[in-house]
Amino acid sequence: MPATLLAPPIARPTRTPLPPEAVQRLDAYWRAANYLSVGQIYLCDNPLLREPLQLAHIKKMLLGHWGTTPGQNFIYTHLNRIIKRRDLNMIYLSGPGHGGPAVVAGTYLEGTYSEVYPNISQDEAGLKRLFTQFSYPGGISSHASPQTPGSIHEGGELGYSLSHAFGAVFDNPELIVACVIGDGEAETGPLATAWHSNKFLNPATDGAVLPILHLNGYKISNPTVLARITQEELDQLLRGYGWTPYYVEGHEPALMHQAMAAALEEVICDIHQIQQRAREHGDLTRPRWPLIVLRSPKGWTGPKEVDGRPNEGTFRSHQVPLAVSATAPPEHLAQLEAWLRSYKPEELFDEAGRLRPELAELAPRGNRRMGANPNANGGLLLHDLHLPDYADYAVAVPTPGSVEASDTGTVGQFLRDVLRLNAAPRNFRVFGPDETLSNKLDAVFEATNRQWDAATAENDEFLAPSGGVLEMLSEHQCQGWLEGYLLTGRHGLFNSYEAFVHIVDSMFNQHAKWLKLTLEIPWRRNIASLNYLLTSTVWRQDHNGFTHQDPGFIDHVINKKASIVRVYLPPDANCLLSVMDHCLRSRHYVNVIVAGKHPAPQWLSIDAARTHCAEGIGLWPWASTDAGQEPDAVLACCGDVPTLEILAAASILREHLPELKIRVVNVVDLLKLQRPTEHPHGLPDADYDALFTRDKPVIFAFHGYPWLVHRLTYNRANNQHLHVRGYKEEGTITTAFDMTVLNDLDRFHLAMDVLDRVPQLGNKGAYLKQHLKDKLVEHRQYITTHGEDMPEIREWQWKA
């Protein structure tokens, strides 16, 4: 088909076609990138075909993905041209899965790759190493992994490229992110939703995203939806999302080079005009940002046919088009050699194996190279947050349990001033799926608004073209935006209902893996931590019910590398302030903070909270009765509601069995329970045993699933005496206290656990146990009759 450029129906300035010599040089550069990409998939020797190709030059295992690669090489080549022509600050996100060969080829040709990996030199020996390392043991993966310069988006899992792109340009006004979206990737839910990110972009204070939808027609073995709908339907879809699409379509290289160059001139002109209207004339009317739709054959320039079946332009070109091995058809080796020689490497590389100077000249220079842009190595741009003294927001706690407060409501005031102190230039944002108010963080709206570029109505609240809070009812977008924001050198917080943060389980996986790998790459700089604040927790779902109950995200998080993950469950507001301050100062972690939002008893003064959180775990003498002796039982707790119930159980035992020696231990940093050989925060055995003893019963009230505590402590000395209560998938629409009763986490069950495991109590224990059973019956009858918890539960207070 002929190459075409379909512009929007508005008058545009005439663009002069590229002169023939410019097209020839662009095509040669593209051929060089394609040659390097095929070489990465197949070759381990003879990188410039100085001799006839032999099986000895071929890798034993052929792994990689060719289908998306030539199209991405084409895009990268043309982006280089427009960057250099317009002096653009641009990075490249490779959304299609397994597009690594293209990004590696692009960064190698521009020189960045050899700068960060000097052994992959720009000569024949370096080419041999470049080819051999790809999809090879100890080498690099087939996506744009953290090892790839210029990458902030791996592409191993599809769907998040456009979200990452927008996160990168928020508060980054000079940056343009060219985001290549595979047509297979476009079928994912997160990507389909991410088109709406243009309603949250402020052209005055943010940068720009240039989506390039790459329609090559196929996934692994199926056609793609967007490639098989009509042009009219596709155009209506993209315009309905609020974009202005430009179409570059065809397969003849010379015509496609002209069309792509013209399209990029048009869209960069559009972007600059939109930004100029906003920045110089104050026009914040929501613009229709441009995008490019590139329709080119899958496996473009690859083998036309393999074994008598079409290959280029079909799903068969998706991975390795030609099997070349001792057991493969022998003609495949000759076909591979013909394919490689079709790019005319002798015209592209000199005798030493370097890209010829007239081609190398096409790439941008210095930090304008997409592989060298510091926005793609965000730690280079990272600045510390300006943080207020969190003690200024403390709840006054004269004695433990004497006052109530909302933990998240308290920390919201701290976050309000974090937003204020980091507003010019903005370096911190709060992200959440329409839950910032629900999660009692409403104080932040005293300092900022929700950023919103769509229409507003009379009764809307806290909406403005610029704001430090980003909310969209898609956890995927919130996480993706935050990741892009962090990866380009800024700070943020994601607040979510605890049960529904599972929606981003897989995104968390990918980010944690990215952090783990970048720790091992010397030229990568550490970025700010990804901070989750999980609230609306399992224990306080009085009207939401069973659907809103799932504390298992922390189980999922703990599967990742100990060098990356941290989990905190502060028992009250002052501890939450201390933990939040710590997490916002930290680097290169995923911090998960679980805290309640409803008014609850406050236990520690700010000074006590500071000490307790620094230690992460500790004995509370004011709640204990062992007075430095060996306890009869240890009551341990982790989480706000478990802490309340453990202390209530302790008060029952103190009242009825004053001779019983009880020790109360509270855990803030969950990973203190592991050994230090398993996690750097882990308590040494001697310290763990000093708290929990080696042989006394331990009744542990835990916020989440009880088996997680067993898993963390499986190799501790006293594990056989550890009895954990936690959530066990019980409870729906009921009272707050009944949720604990249904899961055996309430004070009555916890006290009975002690009675069952301290045999010397005798008849006194038996009478108390009967009393506690009676209380459970009374509780059930009361809530059924009155629809609320008993007064002694609602009005309970700790008494020293």
Image (cartoon, helix red, strand yellow):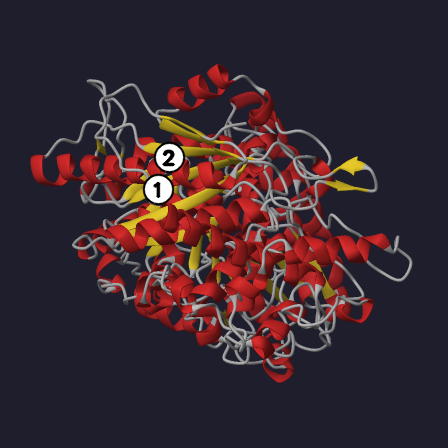
Give the residue type at disc 2: Ser
**Image quarter hosting the N terminus:** top right
**Image quarter hosting the C terminus:** bottom left
Residue at x-position 71% and y-position 31% = 222
Q: Is residue 667 visible?
A: no
Q: Residue 792 at what x, y percent from top left?
A: 48, 40
> Can you tell which quarter of the image residue 154 is in?
bottom right
Report crowding for label 1: few under 14, some 14 to 19, many 20 or more residues within 10 A (C-alpha).
many
Q: Secondary structure at mark 2?
A: helix
The reply to whether dot 1 and dot 2 touch (C-beta < 8 Å) is: yes
Q: CA distance from mark 1 to mark 2?
A: 10 Å
Residue in front for this viewpoint, 433 or 371:
371
Q: Residue 188 at what x, y percent from top left?
A: 57, 34
User: Nearer the observer, disc 1 or disc 2?
Assistant: 1
The residue carrying mark 1 is 209
The residue carrying mark 2 is 197
